Image: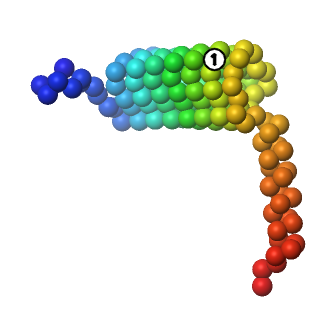
Amino acid sequence: MASDGSPEFEIVEEVKADTVKITHAGAALVQANTVTVTQAGVQRIEASQVTLAHGGAAIIESETMELSHGGAGFLVADNVDVKHSGLGISFADTVHAQDSIIGVLFAGHIEGTPDIKFDARRAAAFGAGATVALFLLRRFFPRR
C-alpha cells in the first residue's frame, strides 16, 4: 500500500517476452507467446495464448483466448473461451461462451450460451438496408 492508503500498481509502456504475467498492473502493448492478465488492464495484446481474468484489454490478437469475468473491446482469435464476460467486437473461428455478452460477433462456430447483440446475419442485413436507404436518398434528394 502507498503511504496515502491507495494500492500500489505499475503501468508499463511496452513488454516483449516469451511469457508475460501481469497482476494488479497495466501495460500499453504486450507481445509474447503466452500472456496471463489477472486484475489488470492492457491496451493491446499480441500473443499465441492469452488468459484474461478479472481484467480488461482494448485490443487482443491471439490464437487461443480465455476470458473469465473480464472484458475486451476488440478481439481477433482462432479459439475463444468466454465465461461471465463481455466482448465488444469479436472475430473468431470457434467461440465457447457461458453467460457472456458479445456486442458484434463474426464466428464460424458458436457453442454455449452467449448473448449476442449483433451477429454476421444482422450485420449483412443492416449493411444491405443501409445501402438501399443511401441509394434511395441519393435518388430522391440529389446534390446540386
* Residue at 60% in and 34% down: 88
The image's colour scheme reads rainbow
Residue at mark 1:
99
Asked if 136 appears above or below 88 in the picture, the reply is: below
Tag 1: Cα neighbours inside 10 Å, few (<14), some, or many (≥20)? few
Secondary structure under tag 1 reads: strand
In terms of image quadrants, where is residue 124?
top right
Percent coordinates x, y for residue 113 in the rendering:
71, 17
Q: Quadrant of the C terminus?
A: bottom right
Residue type at the position of mark 1:
Asp
**Whole-percent x and y of residue 54?**
46, 19
Question: Residue placed at 54% from the left, 30% from the top?
Answer: 72
Quadrant (top left, top right, bottom left, bottom right) of the N terminus: top left
Residue at 42% x, 28% y is 41
- Asked where in the image residue 93 lies, by quadrant, the reply is top right
Q: Name the residue at the left extreme.
A: 3
Residue that sits furthest to the bottom in the current view: 144
Q: Does the rendering let one see residue 33? A: no
Left or right: where 74 falls relative to 43 = right
In the rendered image, is residue 77 in sight?
yes
Task: Please tell me in which quadrant of the rendered image residue 37 appears.
Answer: top left
Depth check: 62 or 87 in front? 87
In depth, the one of 28 and 106 nearer the eye is 106
Image x and y of residue 98, in percent: 65, 15
